[in-house]
Amino acid sequence: MTPTYESYTDFKNQLLTAFRDGEERLNGESKTALHQVRRQALHSFDQLGFPTIRHEEWKYSNVNSLIKQRFTIDGTSTLTADELSSLEIPNLEGNVLYFVNGHYRPEMSHIVSPADQVQIGSLADAIKADPDGVGTHFAQYADYKDSAFTALNTALATDGVVIRVPANAHVEQPIILRFISDARVNNVASQPRNLIVVGKNAEVTMAESFRTLGEQSSFVNTVTEISLERDARMQYYKVQDETNQAYHIGTTQVHQSDNSHFYAATVTLNGNFVRNNLNIVLNGQYAEAYMNGLYMPNGRQHVDNHTLVDHAMPNSYSNELYKGILDDSGTGVFNGKIFVRPDAQKTNAYQSCKNVVLSPNATMNTKPQLEIYADDVKCSHGTTTGQLNDEALFYMQSRGIPKDAARTLLLYAFAQDVLSQIKIQPIREYLEGVVTAKLGQ
Amino acid sequence: MLSISNLQAAIGEKQILKGLDLEVKAGEVHAIMGPNGAGKSTLASVLAGRTDYEVTGGSVTFDGKDLLEMAPEERAAEGIFLAFQYPVEIPGISTTNFLKTAMNEIRKYRGEQPLDAVQFLKLMKEKMQLVNIDQSLLSRSLNEGFSGGEKKRNEIFQMAMLEPKLAILDETDSGLDIDALRIVAEGVNKLRSPERATILVTHYQRLLDYIVPDFVHVLYKGRIVKSGSKELAYELEEKGYDWIKAEVA
């Protein structure tokens, strides 16, 4: 059943029209493999439409208020480097790349790592230089046939980052992608698209940071595809601190080969409506994936984390810990799917989701899903949702710590479990600051 | 120092303390003994300010101030310390961090400057020796995964750090083997001073071999029904509580 009210078709039509308008401006490019993928993706989006809460994957996340909005989608912004200061992360060093309303801004960015360690460039440049080359990697991992938002991104994304880490390289400086929505004047929508290929036995640390500037609505529909070749290691952090007018829907799609290690932390501190999909395919023996998450919706914020770990080969390992602190009328969703394929014997998969609910109006929905088709595996999952421990509060008070301070200290310690995993110190400190401020509210 | 008069307390509908009187002066050690269910732990909890209990009558003054009007943290800052029968696990917060926060909150309450890192560490080293506690334990999350003995020793360590005027030890001997008991008792004894007072809540006489009380009180059915010197504890050890129950009845 497809809803037919006006707003639905309007936003959808706007996006479909934007694609077709863009297509008319193409010359020879329309024949490229890249464009053929885009056309298929647009077709998928057209067929799928925006998901409704009748869709099992969107049961608790209603995108109605998103698709009722109107957004400028051309990516323009008058933001200058000088105006970035309020968004800067103190002491941040490394490769820092800025994207404003989805477009790479070289004049704000700094690439410091030598090219023999890592090649970093914008997707727009890569498309210009070699559309066929991009087409062979583009949309190889993130499925656009069943996901409307991934399909939309695949069809419309024109910029983002392309990162290639050569075999055996150890990228010493972290790579930090900063996606800024400049919503000072208009409602703005962007479709960043990132592709990261980490070569054999190479190592890299990367973060994606999302911020919004201004009081208008923003919508970021982002897709990051990551491929880890054998023995590759990657630390990946997704950090969201947007406004109460910000919508974020993102997919991180990870493909791992033999003995590769992937460590992810997804930290959502602010945003009106956030949906993160983290999909990992362990397509190699002895591949390991670690997923940590922290979310703190308050006010009327909504944060939905969907994770999928697909154990496709034997002897692979996954470990997942998501933690939530929910206050006011904040809502959270955790949906963790573990899939163990028939051949994936000796799989170890662990999943845990722990939540503290501070207000009677806050809601947390958790759903672990284990689908196990092999017989020699170790899998466990557990979810807890509860209030702060009164005994612990009294114990702390009895030592002289006032109740409010005790409460903050306990919640901070709860969050630290995840924050302490973040190895980029300036980012960790920045997050600790936001968490402290938010707990003090 | 502490003056309890006709104290009555209930949990839910159930009246537990039914008119309890007790005077504790600086420098004294009082043992509160009694059979299970007499209200010993309730007394300790009410003094520390646990909100599960409702005070339904009577008064408690501490250094001339109305204790029952104070929040638990204010009582701590005024100098009351409760060593818990079951110390609570605090995930993610080390003993060191916890104590530093507690001490500086208490100092703030008293209008004193916070301790700097050097002063704090110096004090910590000194007190660690007093209760023979290991640094590695203090760096771990407070009480998390500690053995029973480690938890109790940590309570005494916290007490040593906070230097309370009145320490209330709630069944500190329960679950301790004889060696742990001796270490805990030594810590308590080293902290005895003419300015401080201690209330030992215990079911058994055993603890009193190590921490010798000035007074022993028997709590039964929510009242102190008999008081005496340390000899009373031996009598209880020998004869049990039945003769007291008979006397009261």
Image (cartoon, grey):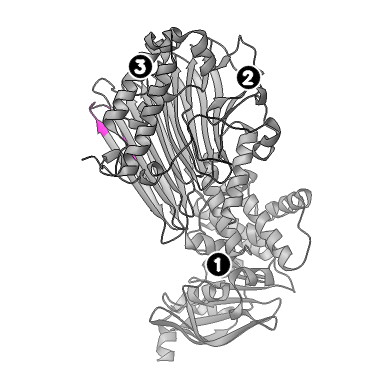
Residue A439 in picture, x, y percent from top left: 57, 53
Residue that numbered label 2 is attached to: A172
Cα distance in 3D space between marks 1 and 2: 60 Å
**Residues rendered magenta in the picture:** A371-381
Q: Chain letter of disc 1?
A: B
The circle on residue B207 is: 1
Residue A34, picture quadrant? top left
- Type of the residue with mark 2: Glu
Residue A369 in picture, x, y percent from top left: 29, 38
Q: In which quarter of the image is the C terminus of chain A?
A: bottom right
Q: Is residue B141 above or below residue B187?
A: above
Q: Chain letter of disc 2?
A: A
The circle on residue A391 is: none
Q: In this view, does A101 lie above or below B153?
A: above
Q: Is A263 one of the magenta-colored residues? A: no
SS assignment at label 3? helix
Residue A304 in picture, x, y percent from top left: 40, 42
